[in-house]
Amino acid sequence: MAGQARRMLGGVAFGLVAIALVVGAALAARRFGLPAPVLLVGASAVYTLLPGPDLRLEPDIVLALVIPPLLFSAALSSSLLEIRANLRAVISLSVLLVAATALVIGGLLVTVVPGLSFAAACALGAALAPPDAVSALSIGRRVGLPDRLRTVIEGESLLNDATALTLYTVAVAAVVGGPFDVPFVTGKFLAAALGGIAVGIAVAWLIGQLRHRIEEPVAETAISLATPFAAYLPAEALHASGVLAVVTAGLVLGHQSRQLLSGAARLHALAVWRLVDLLLEGFVFLLIGQQFVAIVPAIEDYPLGTVLAATAVTIGGVLLTRALWLLVPALLPTRLRFLSPHPHLSGRELVALSWSGMRGVISLAAVFALPLSTDAVGFPHRDLLLFCAYSTVLLTLIGQGLTFGPLLRRLGVRPDADEGRRQRARARVAAAEAGLRTLRSLQGHEPIPVVLAERLRRAAEDRKQRSVDSLTSLNTPTDEQIPPESPTDTFGRVRRTMIEAERDELQLWRDTGQLTDVSLRLLENELDHEEGALPPP
């Protein structure tokens, strides 16, 4: 009993250390401009060298409990319309490039590792073929990705894991005596993909029906947290793609958010999902660093030349295949550019996209899931494949992670902030006009007091005028180095200062006994919602 209590306390202590590392890395990343994933992997690798409990990667837990909510959260914030508009690029990257990467790595490995079968080599290639959207987007959010690149990277994550894990399953089956031919692989992939999409659509429909009958924000958020698992588990049970089911459900529900969720429920769910993303993304990168001690000693029995050659061709295959796939079509003559899967991306954007292919925890989980034996015989070169996979993940995550931001800045690839502001200002004007039309219609059908109607009209006109002023400011050329603050930004800054003063006054009332804590929290909640509705600073 005492031993169990000590283990429990050790687990709690490890959890506290993990949370401290995640929060510390996030703060350090903001303070020093370094990618938080790189800091977490480095800190975690150092931690493994110290005495104390370590965390070992359990493939089933990672694939079933960690990856679904991360992918679902990313899908919720993605645009179904933008992904549909970029479908050609998405299919090219998430299906064709994944298959090409797996085959290239498999072909290179069998030439440098004696006795390694092509199927076993392709199993590693399939595991390393899909870039980790969690890594790229977590770094890209900090440095600022243009909308087109962000959409392609998000769309790429739709099918790439499903493609890779299907190829991986077929390759492993071939090692233990199954077939490994093109018709079999193609049929299995199509069945898994179509099945995953069908399950995702069905789960999204069921969740939508449930949400129509619930109007409690906390309950709706709880349903949202359960949805990725509700999509993943039945899809896997049907031998379909659980990853694709999760992403499909997230895209559909995110697209229908306006019809399914109240404003209060969206605010609540957004805050909860931000916390989930922070903790799970941090856990993923800590987990990668934690495997350092377990993997390195496993290759001691291999000749150094074999280890170096295998690692070099694996990393080279991952980096060069993606770069060539993206950049070679861009070099075609203008009359043949229609053959490129990415004709809408500029050369600079293609270079940036080629450098966004960081590998992550899904690749490691897949390689760790390689069977320990095949018919009482150890899986061929399993330890060497593990080392190659870990080296590739570590190098791409740290090397590309540290250089991705500087590369974007050097290429001049950045989001058009002014165009985004113009789009939002135009939308605010249209929304305010719709509100005014509705007010006039209501006045004709029900008795609204004149004073109240005038207050509502003035509030809508004020919102409309602020947006019109912002559009005028954005469309007026200026020679100043620093653009002037728009009226909308000024309104948000001043109103935030006023809200802070109002909070101080409410707390003073509470401290002097003129207001109860219950009333204070209700009034603070009103101010919090108003502050959340202000334009971002």
Image (spheres, helix red, strand yellow):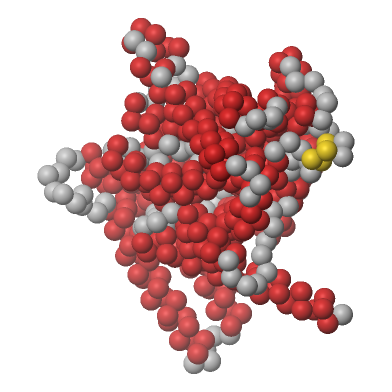
Q: Is residue 453 above or below residue 314?
A: below
Mark count: 0
In the rendered structure, the answer to whether residue 406 lies left or right of residue 284 reads: left
Q: Is residue 509 in sight in this rendering?
A: yes
Residue closer to the observer: 422 or 370: 370
Q: Is residue 262 in sight in this rendering?
A: no
* Residue found 64% across the figure and 54% down from its top: 297
* Residue found 50% across the figure and 54% down from its top: 37
Say which quarter of the image contains residue 51.
bottom right
The furthest residue to the left: 479
Residue closer to the observer: 231 or 517: 231
In the rendered structure, the answer to whether residue 438 lies left or right of residue 424 reads: right
Q: Position of residue 280 (x, y in %)?
A: 61, 56
Q: Quadrant of the N terminus?
A: bottom right
Say which quarter of the image contains residue 454.
bottom left
Residue closer to the observer: 288 or 264: 288
The furthest residue to the top: 335
Q: Is residue 8 above or below residue 57?
A: below
Q: Position of residue 186 (x, y in %)?
A: 71, 18
Q: Position of residue 529 (x, y in %)?
A: 51, 62
Q: Quadrant of the C terminus?
A: bottom left
* Residue found 53% across the figure and 64% down from its top: 46
The furthest residue to the bottom: 512
Q: Is residue 431 above or below residue 31?
A: above
Q: Is residue 153 above or below residue 7?
A: above
Q: Position of residue 130 (x, y in %)?
A: 58, 35
Say which quarter of the image contains residue 168.
top right
* Residue found 44% across the figure and 16% down from its top: 340
